[in-house]
Image: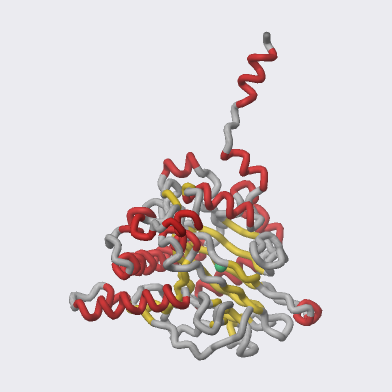
Amino acid sequence: MSMASDMIELPTVDLADLASAEPEKRAGAHAAILEGFGRYGLLYLRGHDVPSTHELYDAFARFTARPEADKQPFNRADIWYQRGWTPPNTERAVVAGGQPDFKECWFSAPLPVDPESAAEFPEVCSENVWPSDAPRFEAMTMGFGSALHRAGMALLEGVACALSLDRDTFATRCEGAPHVFRLLKYLPLTAAQISAGVLWGEEHTDFNLLTLLPGGQFFSPSGEQAAAPDAESGLYLRTRPLPGHPRGLRVRPVAKPGSLVVQVGQELEILTGGRLLATPHEVTAPKTPGWSRFSAAHFIHLHPRAVLSPLPAFRTREAVRAYSPPTLAGTYSQKTLIDIGLAPASSIDSLGYRHYDRLAEQREGQ
Ligand SMILES: [Fe+2]
């Protein structure tokens, strides 16, 4: 990444201001959204009802500590890992060197998905899977994802207003989509991996509409929640190019307790024709062996049938060309999941005609 700057004051948006009856409060929140997403690609969000992560991370830590054989039934390559357990060394970032990330994850959909989409895009719209002996883990995870989703949808109304779009511009395109909540464990590294400069998560941008992060938590080598072993490790984001900083500034978000970090995904970039840019981010590991880090992310997606192309307000010739050809959000997800190593490359064949053999059979009978 380019030069670091931890000194940037990132804007905070309060959901209470967005919902306020006072026009000045709403205008202030809209300005903060435009500054946060338009200039830096991220903002802090408060005024939500997302609970503390403490108990949730402990519950996920207990799951990840189970023997591999207990976790394997939830290792679902057949649904491209979109529900259940993603084992280590599975996903890789697109732009970075292609080294798989050092993490294991759990995916679930906190909200019902449009049943028609489940027929059209079965992998990304799969039913949730859960360990049968961990009802508390299931309930907490579902509650957490739902609370993050509510916060994100309230913010998206503000984003629409800030961009002078109809308030429900994003809401109507998100209803029934396969939004996913992800729990992540970044794995303990050895001294050799640390000296080789291994990253926990290589730099990438998210492919969904909006990502909400409740904040990560380090676990000590003995498995206790603990303060970070150094001040440098953790999540970093890269701003869009700024005057004097063509490669962007490297920012370490430090949200106040109770605030979420929210970042822009590729779908929002495309809909806004690049007015907002997807936020590059990476996760660096500490310099001390044996530490792990737990985090969570909620990914708000467009409905699989939503068309991914700049909205009318952003359809300049350049924007249309930069984001052509238009695709369906579901198709775009499929292509991206191939790119990051979660879906098999052969699944792209399903986008073409699959019934040529009917004619071949008819001709054979002649
Ligand atoms: Fe990400």
> Residue placed at 57% from the left, 40% from the top?
351
Q: Quadrant of residue 271?
A: bottom left
> Residue placed at 52% from the left, 71% from the top?
279
Q: Which residue occupies the extreme top position in the image? A: 366
Ligand 1 is found in the corner quadrant, namely bottom right
Q: In the picture shown, does residue 14 fall above or below 100?
A: below
Locate the N terminus and report the quarter of the image it occupies.
Answer: bottom right
Q: In the picture shown, does residue 105 fall above or below 122?
A: below
Locate the C terminus and report the quarter of the image it occupies.
Answer: top right
Q: Position of residue 80 (x, y in %)?
A: 61, 51
Q: Position of residue 178 (x, y in %)?
A: 46, 53
Q: Position of residue 152 (x, y in %)?
A: 39, 67
Q: Position of residue 273 (x, y in %)?
A: 43, 61
> Residue placed at 63% from the left, 14% from the top?
362
Q: Quadrant of residue 203?
A: bottom right
Q: In the picture shown, does residue 312 fall above or below 51?
A: above
Q: Nearer the viewer, residue 287 or 139?
A: 287
**Is residue 193 left or right of 34 when viewed as pictured?**
right
The number of numbered badges drawn on the structure is 0
Q: Nearer the viewer, residue 66 or 327?
A: 327
